[in-house]
Amino acid sequence: MYKALLKEIEKYDTVIIHRHSNPDGDAIGSQIGMKHLVMANFPGKKVFVVGDAAGRYSFMDEAVMDEVSDEAYAGALAIVLDCGGANMVNDERYKTAKANARIDHHMYTGAFTGTEVIDPSFESCCGIIADIIKSEGLVIDEVGARSLFTGMVTDSGRFRYDSTNARTFTLAAFLTEKGKIDFNDLYSKMYAEDFESLKRKSEFILKIRFTEHNVAYIYTDAAEVERLVGEGMTPFGISRGMVGTMGDIKGVDIWVNFTESEGKVLCELRSSKYNINPIAVKYGGGGHEKASGAAVEDRETALAMLADLDAMML
C-alpha cells in the first residue's frame, strides 16, 4: 500500500498537496509533513501545499499555503490528505491533476482518487505518514517531524482518545527523535487560552441543554451566529471550536453542537462510548466512530438527528 504511493510520487516532477477546509492540526501537520517527506526523499521535485488559511494553527512552521496556477496541475500528482470524502477537499482542482492519490484515517466510504492509503485504525493522518517514513526507511527533517507530531497530538486529544495505542507512542517517539520538539512551547501554542476566550467558552457552557436520555447539545441559531461573528468568532469556531465544552460532563456519553451557518446547520457529533458515525452518515456526513460531523438543511432535520442520538441511549 505504501510502496504504490511512493511509486506514484516518483513518477511526477510536481506534487500538489491538498487537505480539508477549516484545517485542524492534523490537516496542516500532514500537509507540511508530506511536503518534507517528498522534498527529503525525492529531491528536485516541485512541492506545493494548497488550501484555506491555517487559522489557529498558523503558529506551525510553513503553515502559509502556496498560490498554485491551474496550469500547474496538468502534469502533476495531487495528494489529498485527511479527507474522508470528496466533499471535504478544500480545492477541487485535485481532480484536474495528471494523477491523484489520498492518505486518510477516517472511516472508509469509497474511493475518489487513483491511489489510496486508507487506515482508520490510525489516530491521525499524520500518524500514517509517520508510519510510511518509519516502515519504508525514509528520512524526515526537523520541520517535517515537528509538524507530524503536532498533528498526532491534536487528533489523539493529547494521546487520550480510544484510537491511541502502542503504535501511536512508538511513532511519536520516532518523530520526537527527529524533530527536537520543545513540548512546553508546542503545548502552550496549541492550548493556552486568553481570558476573552475563556469568557466565550463560559457563554457556551451556559447554553448546554440535555435530551430525555442525557445527550448534551448546544444550538446556536443564525441570529446568534451573526452576533458572535461580529464579535470576532467564525462559524467554524462556534461549531467545532465549542463542541468540546460538553466533553467532560459526568454522565454524558454523547454530545452534539448545532450551528446555523450559510443556510445550513453544522453538526458536530461526539461520544466517549458509542459509535455515532452511522448517525452522521445517515444525514450526509461522516468521520470517525466517536467524532463525526454533518451539515443538514434546517433546524427540523438537526432535531431529528438529535432524536436519533437520544435513541442510542435507550
Image (cartoon, rainbow, N blue to C red):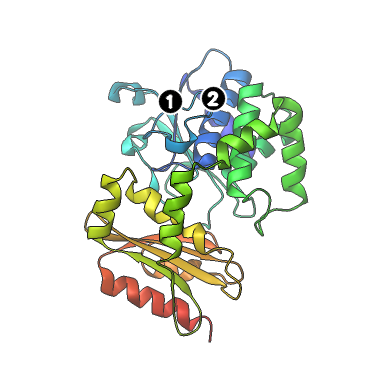
Q: Amino acid at mark 1?
A: Val
Residue 9 to residue 4: above or below = above
Q: Nearer the viewer, residue 153 or 204?
A: 204
Residue at x 43%, y 66% (from the top left corner):
206
Is residue 13 left or right of 86 when viewed as pictured? Answer: right
**Which residue is at a point 73% across and 40% down the rendered structure image?**
171
The residue singled out by tag 1 in the image is 64
From this viewpoint, is residue 92 visible?
A: yes
Residue 59, percent from left and from top: 51, 29
Marking on residue 61: 2
Quadrant assignment for the N terminus: top right
What secondary structure is found at the residue carrying circle 2? loop
Residue that appears at 42% across and 36% down: 55
- Report the amino acid beneath label 2: Asp
Foreground residue among 218 and 270:
218
Q: Percent x, y for residue 66?
A: 39, 23
Tag on residue 239?
A: none
